[in-house]
Image (cartoon, coloured by chain):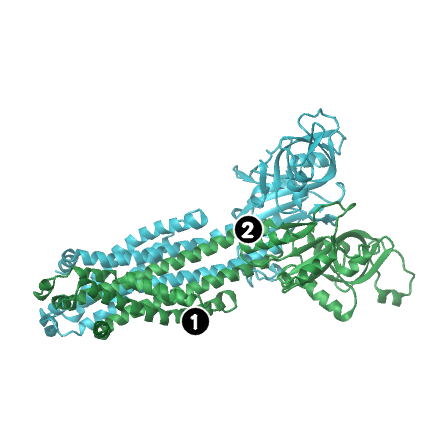
Chain colours: A cyan, B green
Amino acid sequence: MFIRLVADSFSRRPRHKLLTGAALALGMAVATAALSVSLDVGDRLAREFRSLGANLVVTPQADSLPLEIGGVDYRPVNAGAYLPESDLGKLKTIFWRNNIVALAPALEISDQVTSHSHGDKPGGDGNSWGRVPLIGTWVSHTLSLADGTNWQTGVDRTNPWWTITKGGWFTDGTAECVVGKNLARKHGAWVGGHFLPGLPVGDNLIVNLHADGTPLSLKIVGILDTGGPEDDAVIVPLATAQAIAGRPGAYRQLYVSALTKPEDDFGRRDPSTLAPADYDRWFCTPYISSIALQIRQVLPGADVRVIRRVADGEGAILTRVRTLLWLVTFASLLAAALAVGASSAASVIERRTEIGLMKALGAGSGTVGFLLAAEQLLLAFVGGGLGYALGILLARFVGQKIFGVAPGFSFLVLAVTIGLAAIVTLLGSAIPLRRASRYEPAPILRGE
Amino acid sequence: MPDRKMFWRIIRRLLSANRGRLFVILLALAAGAAITAALLNLQVDAKRRLTTEFRTLGANVVIAPAESGTPESAQFLNDSLFADLSEGMDTSSIPKAEFLYGIVKVAKTPDVSAQSSARLPVTKDQNSGASRDVILAGFAYSGNRPEQVLSPVLVAATQKMVETNIPICDAGERAAAALKLRTGDTVALMNGSKKITCQVQTLPSVGSAEDSQIFLDLRAAQALLDQPGRISLIQLSVPGRPREIQDRIASLRRLPGVDVRPIRQFTEGEAKIYDRISGILSATVALVLVLTALCVMAAMTNVAMERRNDVGLMKAIGGATRRVLRLFVAEAALLGLTGGLLGGAAGILISIWLGKQVFGVSAQPRLIVYPVAVALTIIVAIAGAYPLRRLANIRPAAVFRGEG
């Protein structure tokens, strides 16, 4: 009888049920979308912040004091210490290896550079640039890891704001180079005795090799814009820089871009003072300082420093934005709950006559309440389920629009959506139901 | 105008007859308005605050000489440029710092008290007395919140030096480690025949080139490096939205003989993150408005059902459908106005509190938000009254016969 009554109520007034269900589904869709976007947004934003560049820098411990002005080191090549390039794969073996987004080693030298146009004879009179900083690094370099997989990384991932304005990046292991835009603007090409400002891509640069004095010819494949001191430098593959410096397999600085958790009070504590249990917790949290420690453990002789400017700025902004987004999500959940509650309240008020009739036929307040609650719950599950599906689509759209990536599936969202739908419909119906249970059947049936 | 009088009388009756139901609608509208106003205010405020927050990343614009040089043939800017920027009407409050770089020799001077107590002739200690090359950075700053472009320790050091008149040189973490310097040591900085003695203060590690530099007050550094009135570069922390920063850079570019470079690492990263966050906030505000409309629509459907008899009667005694509908739209607008006024005020109060929770500073109420929120609520209320349109199709006869 109970099931028949419920089924009857749905089949008799399908339009009404449809309307209430639609309101419920829409409300829940918005709740789902808000929830899944904001669950996802923290990670996405953290990734977004990596566009600020590396947050860790690794230098040799035994290094002499760098004489660096404007990002270019003026120490002679034989001064200072180096780190072995072969150790870099170990960075992807640390506990938080998946949080290491990118890394790029750098070897900076400065050397005599002469530019040659395409038509020039090798060894002919070139256009001498004098001493120019050369930076050797990786671009889309494939690193073979210990677990047999390959990982692509390089300065194009650590420093996404480095853009090639003309041409393209050099290929690893070739005699190619990329010239900073200021250098390229300053130096032009001599064509038929006339100076043309602006360096054409495709020219060759001649660099004197330190080791045995034989000049090395590098093909210019692109012009680089970084907005930093690299605009006045020539960027070459790391292997080329090592050959020029006579330091095979060595690098001087390593930039690491890692996903981190903003440092809180616990993260700022000195790990050596922590109790073992706390130390484990600290070690297993991706704080920038614990990742720095883990890198120090796998790179012997290296000094790992946090680039405070990037790390602190990121931490401060991320913490605030996360709080803000949670508040906003909470507000939209509240609004969704309000909408659904109001529509379910409306659907109960409509049925006064029916309630009166049921009571006149001898149904108790409890039975009536139970019946209506069951109906509302059924509606909540159907509407909530539909709303969830709709909300996931909405979240995909919003996620795609804002971050270019759809948020992943989360069971939590499904559970919260269905649970919220059930609670809110019941709460929304409870107040009119209570009033309904006090109705006197006679006046209602008389139509008063 | 008896017609208008009648109109308002009916509205009054409509509002007072259905008090319970209308209270629900009013509540929904007010809550919707509150959330909308809070989010709108927070959105305007949060975007502004975010741009302030981004300045914790530090300087985002560098002014350098148009021609860059090497240490042998370094190019300089004139000191007066910085003074002009500091006094310019629209650039005076921007945090900025000027730097002069040069290579000097550093030697740790033996501890004066130890020397006097031992009464030994000063011998050249290979570890502490040997001079080493180091980068000297002369610095000066101006503008509000200089800690955005300079380590707070340096800012404090300058103030201390003004008070005590003892030259302080601040050693970066790596420089201090390499030269074995501790806070309180005295060192001699030498450039050719020029020499300056100062008290060391060590700086915490920042992970960039500053770690291996020694900082000295700009005037002293200019004298030591024999570059009076010259500086190597100026760093600015330009506040504002990405567009405003671009405008400021464009206006700075008009200065003669200088190269104004945005630090693209920060200007571009900032612009990207800012777009993302404001996108999320705008999307949420839109969603909440849709929800409020939904809420009102549900309640209005209900009202429409109840009004069948009233509408039937009105039509039976000659009320035109248009006039009847106008009545209900006016009612909805009135509800929207009341809900919007109440809710909007509440929402702005909420946002002030929320702003305090998120950014530590209470959000400034934006007056523009209030009318916008009220207007939006009225629109939502009228849109939500759409179910009342169904009343237009009511046939009075059917209603009076008691048919559904």
Quarter holding residue B57: bottom right
Give the SS element for disc 1.
helix
Q: Quadrant of the C terminus of chain A?
A: bottom left
Q: Does any portion of residue A413 appear in the rendered image?
A: yes
Left or right of A122 in this view: A394: left
Q: Earlier in the sequence, mark 1 or mark 2?
A: 2
Q: Does any portion of residue A293 appear in the rendered image?
A: no
Residue that lies at the very extreme toward the left in this rendered image? B401
Mark sitting on residue B349 = 1
Circle 1: residue type: Leu
Left or right of B271 in this view: B289: left
Mark sitting on residue B269 = 2
Q: What is the chain identity of the residue bearing mark 2? A: B
Q: Quick check: A63 above or below A119?
A: below
Mark sitting on residue B341 = none
Q: Residue at x 40, y 56 (%)?
A: B283
Q: Residues within 10 Å of mark 2 (few under 14, many from 20)?
A: many
Residue B91 image position (x, y, % from top left): 63, 60
Q: What is the chain identity of the residue bearing mark 1? A: B
Number of callouts in the render? 2
Circle 2: residue type: Gly
Q: Quick check: A147 above or below A3?
A: above
Residue A412 image position (x, y, % from top left): 37, 55
Residue A292 image position (x, y, % from top left): 60, 52
Left or right of A410 in this view: A224: right
Cα separation between marks 1 and 2: 33 Å
Q: Quick check: B355 above or below A117?
A: below
